[in-house]
Image (cartoon, rainbow, N blue to C red):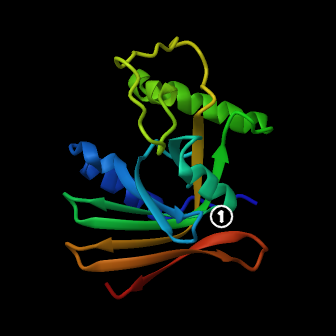
């Protein structure tokens, strides 16, 4: 059953708009559970919302550690701070990894769309060496070419975070709100919100 659009989503859209002059406002931290059981955190880029939903889109390299971490434990949390408006969002939920082996045709189309909405420079990254491995210097740096009309390369993955908890803090107004997914009497799900102490 579909979850209705969340009340926190408009807050987040407003924050993105009021901080749009700052390039770093589209970057946030994504924490997952590392393969060693410890927290694993990194900075990623906001690629928008899934159409007509609350789900957050993130592009990543399928060869990176985070993909294996998510496959083992699909839970993650975003921490996003907007420096101009002094707002913080902590968004928790489950992550879905969409790579080229996915059997769902609609998800593969989503992945392809994410690929083509990325800049050519961003797409070029997925042709480089495997992230996290030792750097082997072999002669001059060779420029890898990529046909702009070609679909996603094997290393390209789309991550989709499906939020179930959001903690919003506004340091200017000293306001904090907690949003949670709740089951309602009709067997559906809805967002509940309450003010909490900052």
Q: Quadrant of the N terminus?
A: bottom right
Q: Which residue shows up at 45% across the image and 16% down it? A: 144
Left or right placement of residue 82 versus residue 101 in this view: left
Task: Please report the residue visible at 55 percent of the width from the left and 64 percent of the height from the top.
Answer: 34
How many marks overall?
Answer: 1
Give the crowd class for mark 1: few <14, some 14-19, many >=20 residues within 10 Å. some
To which quarter of the image does residue 99 belong? top right
From the viewer's perspective, is residue 39 above or below residue 59? below
Q: Nearer the viewer, residue 70 or 26?
A: 70
Q: Residue at x 62, y 34 (%)?
A: 111
The residue indicated by pointer 1 is: 73
Residue 69 shows in the view: yes
Disc 1 on helix, strand or loop? Answer: loop
Q: Is residue 70 left or right of residue 23?
A: right
Where does residue 154 sit, x and y in percent of width and height?
63, 29
Residue 51 shows in this picture: no
Foreground pick, 136 / 130: 136
- For this view, does 26 lie left or right of residue 171? right
Q: Identify the residue at horizontal 58%, vertical 47% (top origin).
A: 159
Residue 5 position in % (x across, y down) = 57, 58
Which one is nearer the viewer's eye here, 35 or 165?
35
Question: What quarter of the picture does the C terminus occupy?
Answer: bottom left
Instruction: Return the x and y of residue 80 as percentages of the image width and height.
Output: 36, 60
Identity of the residue furthest to the bottom in this view:
197
Q: Is residue 159 above or below residue 174?
A: above
Q: Is residue 130 above or below residue 42?
A: above
- In the depicted structure, whether residue 37 falls above or below residue 108: below
């Amino acid at each position: 059953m579909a979850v209705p659009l969340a009340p926190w989503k408009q807050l987040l859209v407003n924050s993105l708009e009021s901080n749009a002059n700052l390039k770093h406002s589209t970057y946030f931290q994504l924490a997952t559970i590392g393969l060693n059981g410890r927290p694993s955190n990194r900075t990623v880029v906001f690629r928008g919302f899934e159409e007509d939903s609350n789900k957050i889109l993130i592009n990543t390299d399928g060869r990176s550690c985070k993909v294996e971490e998510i496959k083992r434990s699909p839970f993650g949390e975003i921490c996003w701070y907007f420096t101009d408006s002094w707002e913080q969002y902590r968004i928790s939920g489950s992550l879905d990894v969409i790579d080229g082996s996915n059997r769902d045709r609609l998800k593969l189309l989503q992945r392809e769309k994410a690929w083509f909405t990325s800049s050519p420079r961003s797409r070029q990254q997925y042709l480089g060496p495997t992230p996290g491995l030792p750097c082997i210097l072999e002669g001059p740096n060779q420029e890898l070419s990529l046909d702009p009309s070609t679909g996603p390369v094997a290393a390209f993955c789309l991550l989709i975070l499906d939020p179930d908890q959001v903690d919003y803090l506004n340091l200017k107004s000293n306001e904090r709100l907690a949003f949670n997914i709740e089951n309602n009497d009709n067997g559906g799900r809805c967002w509940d919100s309450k003010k909490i102490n900052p």
